[in-house]
Image (cartoon, rainbow, N blue to C red):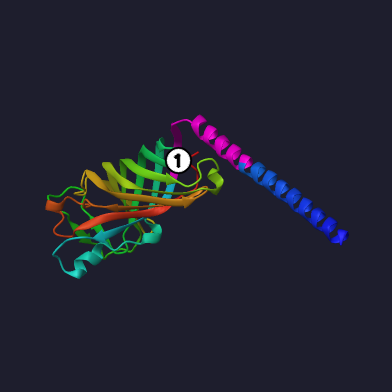
Amino acid sequence: MMFWRYDLLILMFCSMLCLGLTAQESDTLNLSILEEVNTDSIRLSEKRRMTTRWFLVDLGWNTLSQTYGNVPQSYYDTLDMNVRKSLHIGVNIFRQRISLYRHRLNLEYGFALDFQRYELKNQFTISPYENFLTLTLVDTVVFTKNRLKITSLSIPLLLEYESNPLKMKKSFHVSFGGYVGFVMGAKQKQKTEEGGKASSKGNFNLSNIQYGLQSEIGFSYLTFFARYGFHPLFIKSQDRGYGFTPMTFGIRLVPFY
């Protein structure tokens, strides 16, 4: 009869020992978690509230969206774009980010130089200086290049969310806001099958100011961006009712940090 009592005492002692070890491991784990959280908080507090990057490059494509107008569909076709060749190159001269909350919620703004190409599919020449947008059909030669090039300065303003500001290589980021751009100059460049080249500079009845929405989304070093213009590409009172607004989309391979 005594043996089962000894067994019971041994079993109770082992149970108490296991409970003590479990509690100690739990306390150690909780302490480790607290230390990690405190370390992350210190690292976040040590990050600079404002960060500046220079010469970020955007690569993308341009197209046109018809948002208003009262001309026949055949008139819209005159400005059909070859999107594959309608390249966009944006050089962000500088881009600044200001932390609004623990480097997860940020304000981004900058100053960029944009080079936009609009490759026309059809055989039309845009007159550089006319009271109204004037497109002339050229059927005597075949263009191998028929391109309207626009250079402008743009200022983006975005609200950005960063999922993991301490490990940017594993961080998801998304931003949304707008932009405003100022046209600096424009040129139409043409090349024929016979090898002849021609170019003309002018205002082409382009709007001097562009503005619209801009959004960006990405993971780690890769960022996709898109712009949707709210202002017509050509001056509304001079575009003969075409009603085209610009759209741009592309990628940025260089990370912000």
> Of 57 and 32, which appears nearest the observer?
32
- For the N terminus, the image quarter is bottom right
Q: Position of residue 219 (x, y in %)?
A: 50, 51
Vertical arrangement, residue 167 with respect to residue 240, above or below: above
Vertical arrangement, residue 71 with respect to residue 248, above or below: below
- Which amino acid type is shown beneath numbered disc 1? Leu
Vertical arrangement, residue 179 with respect to residue 8, above or below: above
Secondary structure at badge 1 equals strand
Residue denoted by label 1: 56
Quadrant of residue 9 in the image? bottom right
Quadrant of residue 126 in the image? bottom left
Left or right for 174, reference 238? right
> Of 10 and 2, which appears nearest the observer?
2
Task: Confirm whether residue 132 shows in the render.
Answer: no
Vertical arrangement, residue 35 with respect to residue 226, above or below: above
Which residue is pictured at 21% across the width and 50% down the height? 231
Which residue is pictured at 63% across the width and 41% down the height? 32
Neighbours of disc 1 within 10 Å: few (<14), some (14-19), many (20+): some
* Magenta-colored stretch includes residue 33: yes
Which residue is pictured at 17% across the width and 56% down the height? 134
Left or right for 218, reference 1? left
Q: Position of residue 217 (x, y in %)?
A: 43, 52
Q: Which residues are magenta?
A: 31-57
Task: Confirm whether residue 24 shows in the render.
Answer: yes
Which residue is pictured at 24% across the width and 64% down the height? 78
